[in-house]
Amino acid sequence: AMVSLLGLSLLLAAAVASPGRLVPYDLLYADGVRAYLARDWGRAAELLQRAIHSYAGLRAARRACGDSCRRDAAFLGGPPGAGPWEAVLFGRVLQRADCLQHCLGNRLGAALSAHRASHAIRRDFERREPYNYLQVAFFQLKKLDQAVSAAYTFFVANPQHLQMREDIEKYRRMSGVKADKFQDLEATPHWESYEAGVQHYNADEYLQAVARLEESLTGALSALEECRALCEGPWEDEDSEEEMQPGLYEAIAAHYIQVLKCRQQCILEIATKPGRISATEDFIPSHLDLLQFAYDRVGNQALAAECAASYLLFYPRDEPMLEKMKEYHRELGEDTAVTARQSIQHYVQRSLMEKKLIYYAVEHLGGTFNDPDLWTPDELIPENLKEKHREDQEKQKQETLDVEERDKRGPLPFEGIDVTMDSQQMNGTQRVVFDRVLTESECKDLLRLTKAAGEAGDGYRARRSPHTPHERFEGLTILKAMQLVQKGDVDWRDARLLLQASEKARKIIESYFTPGRKLHFSFTHLVCRTAVEEEQEGRLDLSHPVHADNCLLDPEGQECWREPPAYVYRDYSGILYLNDDFQGGGLFFTEMDTVTVTAEVHPKCGRLVAFSSGKENPHGVWAVSRGRRCAIALWYTHSQEHAEQERGKAEELMEQSAMEHNQSDGEASHSADHSSRSSSEPPTANSGARARSWRHKPGSDTMQHPKELRVRDEF
């Protein structure tokens, strides 16, 4: 029986049509990038397209052979009394391996091992990096239509890529570029259908919604099967340095559990829209929820009941859906059998079986498992893992909130600025630190402004800080700075730099936190705090006590009251630091108790810290124990009626000063807003990704034109 089955599998595998040898995609990609760097645009375009085709072909072959061998070398249904269990079990395993090897060999034209690319290369293809290079090659070949499609395909998956955003806008302005060429060549059909279905649903167009949501559900389940087939790859040993190699059964168990975990994570892959980081929660159940309501609205109670029954497989205790099922039973008749969809039954049963095996392995063999589903029944999880599971779910929810916050961000409007810390790294929400917002020379010019204003007096005289007797406090508003310019007390260019630096900070914060929604200045203050040397001994207070910027903090009640005298209209806050030659003076964030420190920010020239002004961000300033700390304090509001009135007057005075000094806008030597590239320049590939290792010929030159091409650092 074993011989006949093996022979049958060989015959079936050989019958699969062979398209010829498929060259490994990582080799094609490496050669394509080398041609790109050598400015051989035609060969670069050819090789990169072949690499993309090879990558797609490999995935298709894995899926097709997986489907074929599941049918032709099935594990279940063996003949009774076939012999000891070990021979029966491993006989089927050997048949499946034999089938896959021959099927993939026929389809790929070479051993599968030749197509095992490094993790770095696989990540490049997942991020669509080849299209980044491809669009430049097509542009140089004057094939604009193909360049536009390649650029747009990369941009869809990398919407935060500032350089590509500029390139897309340039393409839109070019004559001869058609709008229909801005297409995603790697579009996932189920996402297009899902978004169209949700739009119809929200517009109460339920017939159209039903059609598109059904397309999406079918496509999502199909994409899920493809992802699961790709999980059956080589064992990726996370502890390769382990001296003791596992035995037969331990090795089999470890590899099998790795595959099961990969299959479970596939739902996250298909539920994540290209360009996003977070997956849509309950992606499959949400389809059924929407379909149930839409079918109900168009009067098809039978299909609505089927969707409701399918949804209840995920959430059997959902009260609203249980009530709807009672209604459908009354409307359709108690004798009418209402069952869940076969495809959904199979999906849930298979997923639960896999989860049960994984949790058993975690409990008895060790390891971890991040369950991607919110609907996993509590009784399926072993008792000693339930607490860990709840913690993981809470952590996952917080990560989802953080990712949603990141998804809302727009690209930064200036090049060269670094995001040093984000909300997650700062253990909070709506917090960020940028570096390189100002240059060293710009910081020096602004410090010179504080010195000149101090010498002039007139509202800038040093006085005791309102927050502590151990420091002197100096403050300069933008209107006061312009008035000092008119008196000849300060250089007009330094005052202009104060306006420009604060506006640059506003644009950065607006684009990061509220893209598409205008932020207005609420107040701008150039502030210096100087330690009083003779009064630092035994000091225990802060330079600025813990507070929130738009509400009155109540640590005991764990509340923050958004009412006067708080500046309730403030929405975002920022501090742009000018120096670091002092001791202390760092910013810190706390919990609502004002005691538990969650994050600290150390000042330095050009560093901008920004955060929302509400109760989620209580903050204070450590004591300045030596030297002078200077920064531009900034507050912003969405409310135009609370916009800073002095700013308009200051800008008018600045225009007058500029005219008097015959300075054109383009000659500003201290401008904080650097101009972008000329529109006549070609688009450039510039991913800024980390260095990676490549398979390449020894002695190959991969650094031929880095300055001219502005390619990635590793090349």
Image: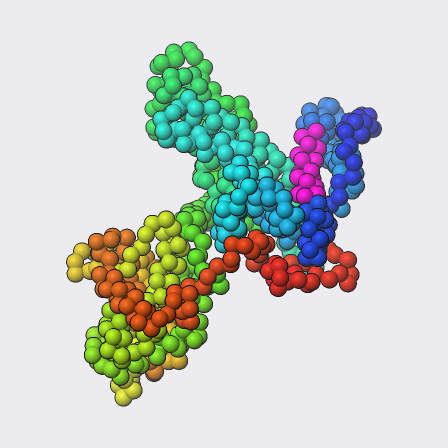
- Viewer-side residue, 326 vs 657: 657
Task: Check the image and report above or below for 7 versus 233.
Answer: above
Q: Give, as a single range, the part of the protein colored magenta.
A: 48-68
Q: Position of residue 215 (x, y in %)?
A: 51, 27
* Residue 675 coordinates in the image, percent (x, y): 46, 61
Query: Can you see residue 310?
Result: yes
- Write down the quadrant of residue 653 in the picture: bottom left
Front residue (pair 273, 44)? 44
Q: Residue at x 45, y 67 (%)?
A: 436
User: In which quadrant will I find the N terminus?
Assistant: top right
* Rendered residue at 22%/61% (across/down): 645
Q: Is residue 50 magenta?
A: yes
Front position in the image: 567 or 10? 567
Quadrant where the C terminus is found in the figure: bottom right
Left or right: 566 in relation to 506: left
Is residue 625 something that shows in the picture?
Answer: no
Q: Quadrant of residue 601?
A: bottom left
Numbered-mark total = 0
Furthest-left residue in view?
A: 564
Q: Does 455 sit left or right of 667 as displayed?
A: left
Along the horizontal axis of the image, is 348 left or right of 496?
right
The residue sitting at the bottom extreme is 534
**Dominant secondary-structure state across the stretch colored magenta:** helix
Residue 268 appears at what percent x and percent y? 52, 41
The answer to if 192 sits in the magenta stretch is no
Rendering colour mode: rainbow
Can you tell which quarter of the image residue 440 is in? Answer: bottom left
Name the residue at 37% across, 58% down.
507
Residue 37 in the image: x percent, y percent? 68, 57
Q: Residue at x 27, y 88 (%)?
A: 534
